[in-house]
Image (tube, coloured by chain):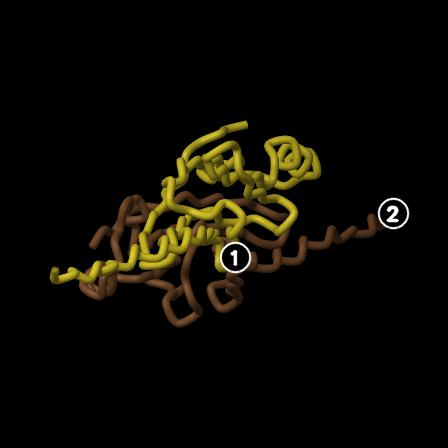
Chain colours: A brown, B yellow
């Protein structure tokens, strides 16, 4: 069983960071997105070596087997200005997209004018 | 623009050969399956460098960019015992599966007994 890296893009938008990970061939229950302290962990596992072995026993012949990556694992340390409660994840066409919202910026301190008293 | 190889499995079933190719992140109109003589050609192209450049201009910042594979291309020389008219392709979860049926086996020649005449 291989645990290998898969390519990812990280994009900064004005209000969020977006983590895009190639993870082809997964079903919903085969992938997991969770937080470990300040680190976003994305993982997934597809058809195992054992399942393939079972197929071979049933008379199915693997002529070429390059898709050996069965376990995906990707970790991203999140920047400080994100809200770890506001994370959403979407899987489409073998690509997992995780969006982490930024914390709203603190209100800029208003300039306060002090009226000058003329004596 | 990169044109790189993507992993594939080739499996032989009793009645067909199956070609499984990881091609995450494609829409239907971004992929193509065709025959060049006896070769099955599978190709696809996803978001181009140009589109990404446009995004960058619009204030979107690429912090990490590992998903540089934008063009997929995979070629398979088909065995002689297939029927190139019977090819079907399905794309699901970023994985393209092409099934090529085998030609039906010729009917085994029936043994013909010649009756021995006893003189």
Residue furthest to the left in view is B119
Residue A78 in sight here: no
Is B65 above or below relative to A88? above
Which quarter of the rendering shows the N terminus of chain B? top right
Which quarter of the rendering shows the C terminus of chain B? bottom left
Q: Residue at x 36, y 42 (%)?
A: B7
Residue furthest to the bottom in view is A29
Binning the other alpha carbons within 10 Å of mark 2 as few (below 14), some (14 to 19) or many (20 upward) gives: few
- Residue A60 lies, in percent from the top left, at 26, 59
Left or right: residue A40 compared with residue B53: left
Which tag is nearer the camera, tag 2 or tag 1?
1
Binning the other alpha carbons within 10 Å of mark 1 as few (below 14), some (14 to 19) or many (20 upward) gives: few
Return the mark for residue A77: none
Q: CA distance from mark 2 to mark 1?
A: 83 Å
Residue furthest to the front in view is B119
- Residue B58 lies, in percent from the top left, at 70, 38
Q: Which quarter of the picture shows residue A11? A: top right
Which residue corresponds to mark 2?
Answer: A118
Which residue corresponds to mark 1?
Answer: B90
Please tell me which residue lies in front, B35 or B3.
B35
Left or right: residue B33 compared with residue B101: right
Discs 2 and 1 lie in a common subunit: no
Left or right: residue A24 compared with residue A90: left
Left or right: residue A111 compared with residue B6: right
Q: Residue at x 32, y 59 (%)?
A: B14
- Residue A62 lies, in percent from the top left, at 26, 51
Q: Residue at x 72, y 54 (%)?
A: A110
Residue A104 in sight here: yes
Please tell me which residue lies in front, A8 or B26.
B26
SS for callout 1: strand
The chain to which mark 2 is attached is A
Q: How many numbered tags mark residues here?
A: 2
């Amino acid at each position: 069983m291989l645990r290998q890296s898969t390519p990812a893009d990280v994009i900064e938008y004005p209000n969020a960071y977006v983590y895009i990970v190639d993870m082809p061939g997964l079903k919903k229950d085969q992938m997991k997105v969770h937080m470990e302290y300040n680190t976003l962990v994305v993982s997934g596992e597809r058809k195992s070596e054992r399942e393939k072995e079972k197929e071979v026993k049933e008379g199915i012949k693997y002529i070429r087997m390059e898709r050996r990556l069965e376990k995906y694992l990707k970790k991203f340390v999140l920047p400080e200005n994100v809200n770890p409660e506001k994370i959403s994840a979407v899987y489409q066409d073998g690509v997992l997209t995780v969006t982490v919202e930024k914390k709203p910026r603190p209100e800029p301190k208003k300039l306060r004018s002090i009226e000058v008293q003329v004596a």
